[in-house]
Amino acid sequence: MRGTGWPAVVSAARVVWRTVGPVLGTVSGFGWAVLAATIAALIAGSILGWRELLVIGFVLLTALLIAIGFAIGRSAYAVRLDLALDRVVVGERAVGRIAVTNTSARTLLPARIELPVGSSFASFALPRLAPQAEHDDLFGIPTHRRSVIVVGPVRSVRGDPLGLMRREIRWTDPVDLYVHPRTVALGGSSSGVLRDLEGVESRIISADDVSFHALREYVPGDDRRSIHWKTSARTGKLMVRQFEETRRSHLAIALSTNRSDYADGEQGEDEFELAVSVCGSLGVQAIREERDITVLTQNDTLESATGRRLLDELSGVEQTERRESIVQLAKTTGTAVPQASVAFLIFGSTVTPSQLQASTVHIPLGIRVIAVSARPGAAMSMRRIGELSLLTIGQLGDFPLALRRANS
């Protein structure tokens, strides 16, 4: 009897647990507290003979049983989460749609749909749905700030009004909404920074290039193809050509994310957003012109295979508390992109001229350095600090003109 009875008990317990387990999993923290209070009131009322405690216990027990009725029930939905656009510019309208279809053969009771959007969430009331009926809701997403917003996952929620029970079912995967920084079209202004698409002349002397520099006497080991025979015949000495090395147009853009390179508070945030927009404008223009480009911050090298990918990366760039100043960023840039033709250093209002002079020491000879100071509201200006050109930008629309001035 015992051998045949025990498996039956285990089987029955499993059936009970499959029924009760999901219900217990829906009990909220508040629900467990109410359950504990219910048990305590019933036990204390029975032992002490206090009818008041027994009444309280039975009332709480009734509330728990009613809450269970709210939580149970089958959910057979097909849920779609659609964003009209998964990439928008700061300030543009972002709209999405949730469509819920009852895929079962019977009517489903009302429920609630929750949609996390970034750090907050939206809630939608889902009415009774007949078989194969569909209900949809439209929603808007604030895009007043550059960011990467995680939308979803969509989940259905069943529960009682008191919050004793809460049953969640996830229906979709989350999707990313990229809020890109504002950019400005540079047109031909960025092209003017470099002398031509093939490269700019450096101060490095080479034995074989396209930019002729001078003649010198032949020394053993020189390539005989570089001998200038007419001059050699005239002087009676073998003379060889020297060239200035040219570099393929490679743009290095160094964006400071160090909080100390920007002002404090809201002003510093405005400076950083302007700096990010300048970085994006330069990068997108260079990619459009099919130039080599490297974009760096103190934290990482950003992906820049396409303009869209670069703007996606810039959407998630934030200021940091790291100690690397603009000088360390310039050193990193010079080490990472030693063959760049032009290097841009982009920062806020707190960077000093002495820091910029120290920065140029770490940029290899032959690389033109242009510094951009983002200062919202300031008048546009351009000045020289040694070999470096310093542009002060008060608004994004000033940047194309300032860039043309830097090349004049």
Image (tube, rainbow, N blue to C red):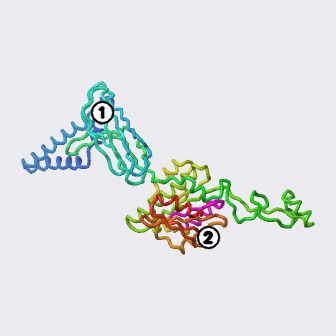
Q: Position of residue 217 (x, y in %)?
A: 86, 67
Closer to the camera, 393 or 265?
393
Q: Secondary structure at mark 2?
A: loop
Quadrant housing residue 272:
bottom left
Closer to the camera, 346 or 133?
346
In this rendering, the answer to whether 329 lies above or below 141 is below
Q: Position of residue 347 (x, y in %)?
A: 49, 65
In screen coordinates, is 165 left or right of 268?
A: left
What's the amino acid at mark 1? His
The residue sitting at 60% across, 59% down in the picture is: 193
The label on residue 15 is: none
Residue that label 1 marks: 135
Residue that label 2 marks: 387
In this rendering, the answer to whether 10 lies above or below 297 is above
Quadrant location, the N terminus: top left
| Residue 62 on the magenta segment | no
Q: Position of residue 309 (x, y in %)?
A: 52, 48
What's the amino acid at mark 2? Glu
Closer to the camera, 169 or 372?
372
Residue most toward the top?
105
Magenta residues (range): 328-346
